[in-house]
Image: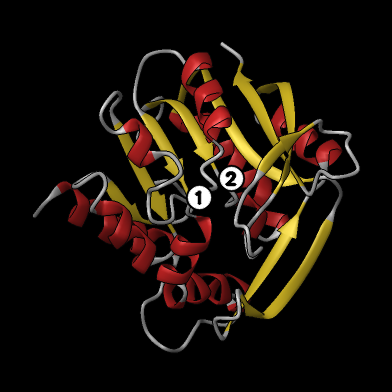
Amino acid sequence: MSWVGNVLEAAARSTNVTTDDEAPDGLAGRELVRRGYDELADTYAAEREGNENDALLDRLRSDAPPGRVLDAGCGDGASALEPLVDERPVAGLDFSRSQATLANEVAPGWVVQGDMTALPFADGAFAAVGAFYSVIHVPAEETPAVYEEFARVLCPGGIAMVTTGTEDWAGRNDDWLAGGAPMEWDIFGLDRSTAHLEDAGFTVYETVGVVDGLGDDEKTSRLVAPDSDDAEKLFIFARLEP
């Protein structure tokens, strides 16, 4: 069996990822997110086209030490895997099987379906973790576990880049991207995100604001100052202490 098959099965067993129609009790929110991305995989990919935020990825490239990069919540692989796959070793993980399948076409053999709260990777395996628009879907009470997992799989001095909010916010859209599937978010603002990252052993060294073009007719994102009134979300860069 391939590396992908082994890790995918292990991730499904250890993180309660389900593929049937009935979600276990207590996983309704998580299953709603997974199923939403399964159902809207192609729609989301089309909406995100042109919103790669290249400047953010360039900063991650330049700041990270040599080594493999993990795209955590990789979607179809366009945000980080595709730009990096020819220059660095990469790996991708997504909660959605449909998204992971698309991303595996970008980095064959190096994408798995799994859960950010229990990453199926070895300690110190990565030089950087990029989490584009993914941690914002994790239930608030589980977000600290995500940052602890990022710290575990990073080498000393490794870089994490995560999307968070300008303020604490949780909500749901029952017809996300006009695609007929619901989606949920549970987002920490800068102060709580920074505190959770520091608790996991990181030092936050830069924050960038973004106007997110997802769902807009023009489908373009732009970066702004983190304290700008236009900022809709934030990207936080943090280094794991040696």
Q: Is residue 182 visible?
A: yes
Which residue is painted at 53% across and 50% down in the image?
Answer: 117
Q: Which residue is mark 2?
A: 146
12, above or below 158, in the image: below
Three-letter code, disc 2:
Val
Sequence-wise, the earlier of marks 1 and 2 is 1
Q: Which mark is residue 142?
A: none
Three-letter code, disc 1:
Met
Which residue is painted at 81% across and 43% down in the image?
Answer: 231
Q: Which residue is mark 1?
A: 116
Which residue is painted at 53% across and 15% down in the image?
Answer: 63
67, above or below 160, in the image: above
134, above or below 98, in the image: above
In front: 241, or 41? 41
Q: Residue furthest front?
A: 218
Q: Are marks 1 and 2 in contact (CB under 8 Å)?
A: yes
Q: Position of residue 22 (x, y in %)?
A: 46, 88
Q: Residue furthest left?
A: 1
Count neighbours of disc 1 (C-alpha within 10 A) and say few if under 14, some if 14 to 19, many if 20 or more.
many
